[in-house]
Amino acid sequence: MATIRIFVTGGTFDKDYNELNGTLVFKDTHLLEMLRLGRSRVDVLIQTLMMIDSLEMTAADRAWIVDACGRAAEARILVTHGTDTMVDTAAALAAGSIAGKTIVLTGAMIPYAFGSSDGLFNLGSALSFVQVLPAGVYIAMNGRCFPWDAVSKDREAGIFQEVKHHVAGGSSDPPGRRV
Amino acid sequence: MATIRIFVTGGTFDKDYNELNGTLVFKDTHLLEMLRLGRSRVDVLIQTLMMIDSLEMTAADRAWIVDACGRAAEARILVTHGTDTMVDTAAALAAGSIAGKTIVLTGAMIPYAFGSSDGLFNLGSALSFVQVLPAGVYIAMNGRCFPWDAVSKDREAGIFQEVKHHVAGGSSDPPGRRV
Amino acid sequence: MATIRIFVTGGTFDKDYNELNGTLVFKDTHLLEMLRLGRSRVDVLIQTLMMIDSLEMTAADRAWIVDACGRAAEARILVTHGTDTMVDTAAALAAGSIAGKTIVLTGAMIPYAFGSSDGLFNLGSALSFVQVLPAGVYIAMNGRCFPWDAVSKDREAGIFQEVKHHVAGGSSDPPGRRV
Amino acid sequence: MATIRIFVTGGTFDKDYNELNGTLVFKDTHLLEMLRLGRSRVDVLIQTLMMIDSLEMTAADRAWIVDACGRAAEARILVTHGTDTMVDTAAALAAGSIAGKTIVLTGAMIPYAFGSSDGLFNLGSALSFVQVLPAGVYIAMNGRCFPWDAVSKDREAGIFQEVKHHVAGGSSDPPGRRV
């Protein structure tokens, strides 16, 4: 079993509650604790790239993530990420000419530290998809896995869903081409 | 996305605590609640076949599970199961001449109802593997997925691990052949 | 056993996480759910007066709480409250000429909805103190119960502690006076 | 604030789940962890006398508890105990000629380790009652506190309730006598 590289970037997944001032903050990642709870025996290497809300993620931050994925020795990479701009980072990764790697992004709607989180389910899901999917960039949320260019977040419903690509033009479009 | 059939058979996954007499019992399955917590959007059909400790599972119970998997209209099936004899049921399923179906068994070491369970992680994992693996019978535990004939439960450690198949005969065995 | 009146005013106790925008919000009180979890058999009447962060509580809000406590038919009253200005509301209650009632304020450092909350412990504590203490206004936090004028919140440490009252003047202070 | 002595005797309160064989077992007490979760600032001394199911408690075990309470330097004592025979131990303590001490027994219907436990609520409650009640032996459960001779456990309902003492004889009973 090849090692899976896990890059932590923050997001709701890892938010904590600061009881002294009642705000949501980032402390350390909960990844190791979650893998322990799941009794995971998957060989992983965890590295924290940043600890930020994905709404605050800049182009430079994304470039850094792309660079880290490109440089990683592992061919299978899991990225934990805030859900709000997860699709943007996935697009940046897809544009990043990282050949031959399977990269899966996942996150959570509820912080892991808050008890009733979807984080553990999502982590189990993403860690599984990343082991078996062919090279490409994917988003694993809601128990499903979407190619990076076939998914969007429905902010009203708080879920990820398949994008129905609208095809400009008429019947002369080549069949099978996803636009 | 094709519907996934989920067959519930009991196991630690679904054990509850009876506070009136302090024993562990089965009530209803927690599957739906767990899928809701995980914000799963996978199309599933849940059916409870039995609610038993897998140590009490008889050959007749296994035959029933094999039969149910064979009759199911769905090509992708998830079976929740006690961990102690999960490998035996996987073997029965593999022997059951169920052609062309992907069947993944999973379970938990700690009851979901007890807070610090591995169940949600395992469910996320198994539900993901079952969506993408080719036809065959598998066990998804500890974040990994094993072919039914390449796994055993280490009861001392409480984990599932790859079986190193011993090859009868000598050095003339072809390299790379798993027997 | 006489009925205990519980007035809910909000505070960290009842904060929830809004997964659609990642903020902390008030929805419904968790009091009933907490009493059910604690298998409470205390006869209570729960009434929500407001649902606010205690830092936003105005003099008018406090007057309303004092008025509600004064009008309540019950002689024993529990008030759930944000911890930041709990001492101020206790002082307002003490100044409110509410004769013959035992009023206990309590709250939490961590929202009940977030799993690892002190809320259930504090509720068990406050509900017990209010049943047995003589008339007066008290704050029940950290497993202790303080008279309203002998307590302050240490914001650095996130705990409530006894106030050592400094008495102006010298050795002629009457004995029995708390110094 | 005087120190409270806490004697741990086991009971559901402290039961754990042994994931290797699926049974309920005693490991270490969760008292310290619970007090930390409740942010308790009560000065306590915790001592484990035994770690057993109260159905297995013998007369010798009870004598040991009575002896420990008698010898303790503290005047206020909390005893964690299985609920099934909590009333019997309370009676033994009351018969034990321990003068001038406030002794409160408490327990839980659901193990603390199982997430949805009443244990934290009960601990907050018992720890509060023991600080303020006059000398005597009490049982604190369900948010209430009962004198040792006025309570019984309703095993069907899983709750503690006041005992209506039946008085032999007729209408000539002296007024004020609890009937």
Image: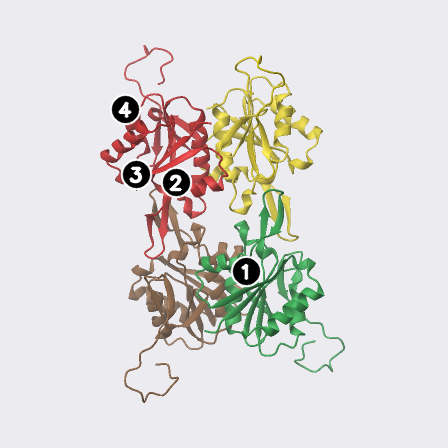
Chain colours: A green, B brown, C yellow, D red
Say above or below: B121 vs D84: below
Q: Residues within 10 Å of mark 4 (few under 14, many from 20)?
A: few
Q: Are marks 1 and 2 in contact (CB under 8 Å)?
A: no
Say above or below: A71 vs B124: below
Q: Is C171 in front, or is C87?
A: C171
* CA gap, disc 3 and disc 2: 12 Å
Amino acid marked by disc 2: Met
The location of residue C111, given as percent across then percent down, is 57, 43
* D58 left or right of C168 in image: left
Q: Which mark is residue D54?
A: 3
First in sequence, mark 3 or 2: give its number: 3
Q: Which residue is mark 1?
A: B40
The location of residue C153, given as percent across then percent down, is 59, 33
Disc 3: host chain:
D
* B88 left or right of C39 in image: left
Q: Is A107 in front, or is D70?
A: D70
Q: Is B1 in front, or is C110?
A: C110
